[in-house]
Image (cartoon, helix red, strand yellow):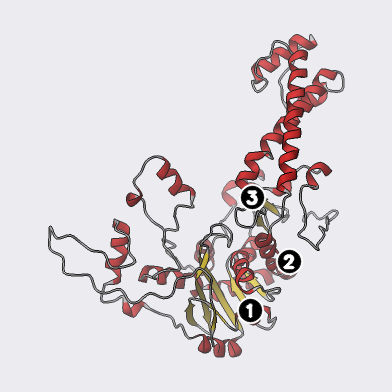
Amino acid sequence: MSGVANPGAKPEPEAVSPAPQYRFGDPYVWPKGYLGNVYEAQRYLREQSPAAASRRRYSTDADKAYRLLQEDRTLAFDLETRGLHPHARTDAAVGAIICRIANQNFIFRSFPAWWADALADPTIRKIGANLKFDLMWCIHYLGIKYARNINDIMIESQILADYRTPSGARDAGFPGKWESNSLQAILKRELGVTVGKSICHEDEYTKPTRAQLKKGVKPQLIRKGVDWTGHWTIEMEDYMLEDIEYLVEAHESLMEKIRADGQERAVWIENNTVFAVAWMTYNGLRPDVPAWKKFIKQQKKGVLKLDKKCRKLFPTVQNFASPVQLKKGMEHTLGIPISNTKKATLKVLAHSFTQIRVLQDFRKLQTRVKNWGESFLDKSVCKVCHRFHPDWRQIGAETSRFSCSAPNLQQIPREQDYRKLFIPKPGHVIASLDYSAIEVL
């Protein structure tokens, strides 16, 4: 069957020719497609080992995969991409679609023609780890509206755990009780399998590399991450196959424990939510950027007015961000001893002193300008589609509630002045829904 082309993905390059005979002192010319640094050299030399060819344990035959899938009805899969989100960079692309069907491995450069139908088919069991990520890319490339019978082993592991989050274990007084739900940790815990996960993913878009470049480290001395849309080394192929080789066994091991624990319904609910979370992550939310910037200017004017008021009310304070200065200034103005300048203390004092209420308003508005001002927009609004794309964590709290980050839109103030800054695309409306007493005990 023909595949669905991936925009931005490079075609499979021709096989790399053997390294030329090298004598000390000769200029060395790297094979096409390699960058001249020590890490690239190590990858290249590993590829030339006699055992390299025998380690290729996969097929690229999409028709064969489809025939097996019709019989086995189980698709374990993973994607390797350039970029963490389809809109994270202008050259974002899927570089590899890796799957395991009936104990056979397959790697494709593009999505097979049957892929979308397989995801939508409720009789085909789909198994993966952190499938929110993979399904997000499927939405982008294939425009899928459904993905049924999803089984995410990271979600399943999290439900089984004594503590679902590090903070939950820490708050309960048992920080050492939390166990990671990474693929590497799950395979070790459930199957006793150790996988390397040693591939470097760093590039000019990731924080560690940007930090090194900022320090003046020469680009050729920085370890470069792999490009999944380019040539696949043996090391990269092994990495891809490790990701899918044990997914079915890990899922079945987890489900056995889930059934023994009576958690089948909880797992069913969470697994059926994964596609919705992928959709939310991909689509994000659209801010009205011009209106937001106008609102920021109004708030800044408000901060200046309240700053002047506070300086009149607390004339001895030069820096309102200094707890020491503010404490002395409050004692001078109010004529009473103050224990500290914490929010809880100000809340008590505000009942008796109007000066404190003005200070509270000043602090509140100043914090909002800092948290949701121009720098927030510059950092958080996607440069490609001009939307927010927060990272939604499906089980992000110990109570199994959602959490989110980058940016944390759950912390946006609830006042209408803020909520109206989010707008739907033409022909749509925003539905605001909430649950009552949703806490899981």
x, y percent for residue 384: 60, 57
**Amino acid type, mark 1:** Ala
**Could you tell whether 314 is left or right of 118 in the image?**
right
In this view, 322 is above or below 82: above
In this view, 382 is above or below 346: below
Q: Residue beneath label 1, please? A: 116
Mark in the foreground, 2 or 1 = 1
**Amino acid type, mark 2:** Ala
Question: How far is disc 3 from disc 1 in space, using C-alphas?
Answer: 30 Å
SS label for mark 1: helix
At 36% from the left and 70% from the top, the residue drawn is 233
Image quadrant where residue 291 sits: top right
Question: How packed is label 3: few (under 14 Cα within 10 Å), some, or many (20 or more)?
Answer: some
Q: Which callout, 3 or 1, points at the residue further toward the start of the chain?
A: 1
In this view, 190 is above or below 418: below
Question: How packed is label 1: few (under 14 Cα within 10 Å), some, or many (20 or more)?
Answer: some
Q: Nearer the viewer, residue 53 or 336?
A: 53
x, y percent for residue 325: 66, 15
* Number of residue marks: 3
Q: Residue beneath label 2, please? A: 266
At 52% from the left and 79% from the top, the residue drawn is 100
